[in-house]
């Protein structure tokens, strides 16, 4: 099983600034990496797939990069609705696996 | 518009069988994979397994011996059964639609989630 490790566990950033979230895979997943946003009591929402492709309706301030084992989600000009928990997920291998999440909180 | 609506028993006792069903509205049922996942405070998000319209499945080895995923194409529904549950199976369970083709494994649409609590 591929282990996904996210850092940091919690990130404090001020509105209007940029947040950078990291995700590392225990072995190469090529670019088969997705990012999700989750708010309390809601299902995860797909933001990014194929490492850098924004899902339908996702604002341009969300961007993803990386390949192989190292990935980054960058959120520019943070808005109030962006403060949530973010998960990375690999879909290169079965079983599909998720990182443990990064909580983005208001500084 | 694609919607996934799930339901099932929310309170179980140890050793019972968890049973959930997910109905799909909108889109072509036969063109996608259909997944079950769960989320607990202790283990985060966990993929349980998936099935396609023809009944072919993939499972998480950690749960495989207890999991049955089935599909009813006549109703555009798929189901999860998890046998011999324990308190460790307490979680919010989600169904999701998985893309196929070049982006196989990407899960865009999710159900609303069902909280399942296992008591001893």
Image (cartoon, coloured by chain):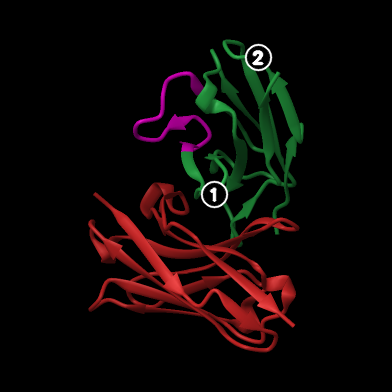
Q: Which residue matches tag 2? A: A14
Tell me, for residue A32, which label it has, or none.
none
The quadrant in which residue B84 appears is bottom right
**10 Å crowding of disc 2: few (<14), some (14-19), many (20+):** some
Can you tell which chain is drawn red? B
Q: Is residue A51 left or right of residue B118?
A: left
A59 within the magenta span: yes
Q: What element does badge 1 sit on?
A: loop
Magenta span main SS? loop
Residue occupying the point 54% across, 74% down:
B10
Q: Position of residue A81 (x, y in %)?
A: 51, 27
Regarding residue B62, the answer to whether it shows in the image is no
Marked residue chain, label 1: A
**10 Å crowding of disc 1: few (<14), some (14-19), many (20+):** few
The quadrant in which residue B116 appears is bottom right
Which portion, as a residue range, is magenta?
Answer: A47-62
Residue occupying the point 44% across, 57% down:
B112
Chain A colour as displayed? green
The vertical placement of A29 against B26, above or below, is above
Q: Which residue matches tag 1? A: A41
């Amino acid at each position: 099983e591929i282990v996904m490790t996210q850092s940091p566990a919690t990130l404090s950033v001020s509105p209007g600034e940029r947040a950078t979230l990291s995700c590392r895979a225990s072995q190469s997943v090529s670019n088969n990496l997705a990012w999700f946003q989750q708010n309390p009591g809601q299902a995860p929402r797909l933001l990014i797939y194929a490492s850098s492709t924004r899902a339908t309706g996702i604002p341009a301030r969300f961007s993803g990069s990386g390949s192989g084992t190292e990935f980054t989600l960058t959120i520019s000009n943070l808005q109030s609705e962006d403060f949530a928990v973010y998960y990375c997920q690999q879909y290169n291998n079965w079983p599909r696996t998720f990182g443990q999440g990064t909580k983005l909180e208001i500084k | 518009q694609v919607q996934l609506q799930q339901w099932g028993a929310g309170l179980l006792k140890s050793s019972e069988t968890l049973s959930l069903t997910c109905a799909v509205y909108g889109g072509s049922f036969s063109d996608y994979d259909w997944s079950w996942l769960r989320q607990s405070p202790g283990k985060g998000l966990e993929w349980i397994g998936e099935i396609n319209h023809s009944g072919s499945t993939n499972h998480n080895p950690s749960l495989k011996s207890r999991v049955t995923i089935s599909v009813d194409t006549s109703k555009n529904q798929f189901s999860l059964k998890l046998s011999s549950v324990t308190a460790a199976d307490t979680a919010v369970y989600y169904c999701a639609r998985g893309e196929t083709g070049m982006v196989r494994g990407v899960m865009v649409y999710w159900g609303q989630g069902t909280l399942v609590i296992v008591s001893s």
